[in-house]
Image: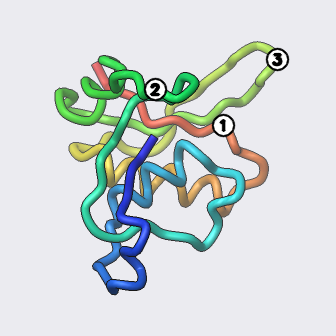
Amino acid sequence: MIAADEDGKVKQLPVNRRATGLWRLLNPDGLRGDFLVGDLVILGARKREDMTDVSGTLIALLLETPKYQVQVCLSRQFNSWISIGRIYDDFFEATISALSLMEGWEPPKNVNVVAVE
């Protein structure tokens, strides 16, 4: 979950490209054309009224991984993923590439950014 200043657009805060990219990658349906502004906080999932911690997997992916690649799911039935494109040094560059795939290539709604070992 991403927490943002609800009045950020009214305050004319700058667009946060990185947070917007992550938000769109994690929530591909219903975010078309919208964007996030200003500083944001990434929170864990919501359980009832409480928030959980951000997963260690997400922290490692965002802060501790040196290389990234985009994957697409070729078969949901067999959970078949294939890496495509180049290797990225920055998670958010890989995210922009993944979003471009989601927008320009039908279907793939199932696109991931993964760590390269």
Q: Nearer the viewer, mark 2 or mark 3?
A: 2
Q: Amino acid at mark 2?
A: Asp
Q: Any mark on residue 110, and which?
A: 1
- At 39% across and 50% down in the image, what residue appears? 3
- At 39% across and 36% down in the image, what residue appears? 69
The mark nearer the N terminus, 1 or 2, is 2
Left or right side of 18 for 36 = right
- At 77% across and 53% down in the image, what residue appears? 106
Callout 2 crowding tier (Cα within 10 Å): few <14, some 14–19, many ≥20: few
Left or right side of 63 for 37 = right
Tell whether label 3 touches label 1 (CB within 8 Å).
no
Would you name the residue on which mark 3 appears? 77
Q: Amino acid at mark 1?
A: Asn
Cα distance between the residues tagged 1 and 3? 12 Å
Callout 3 crowding tier (Cα within 10 Å): few <14, some 14–19, many ≥20: few
Q: Amino acid at mark 3?
A: Gln
- At 59% across and 39% down in the image, what residue appears? 111
Q: Any mark on residue 50, and which?
A: 2
Asked which secondary structure carries label 1, the reply is loop
Asked which secondary structure carries label 3, the reply is loop
Image coordinates of residue 54 in percent, x first then y, are 34, 26
Q: Where 33 sits versus 75, above or below? A: below
Callout 1 crowding tier (Cα within 10 Å): few <14, some 14–19, many ≥20: some
Cα distance between the residues tagged 1 and 2? 29 Å
Q: Residue 91 appears in which quarter of the rendering?
A: top left
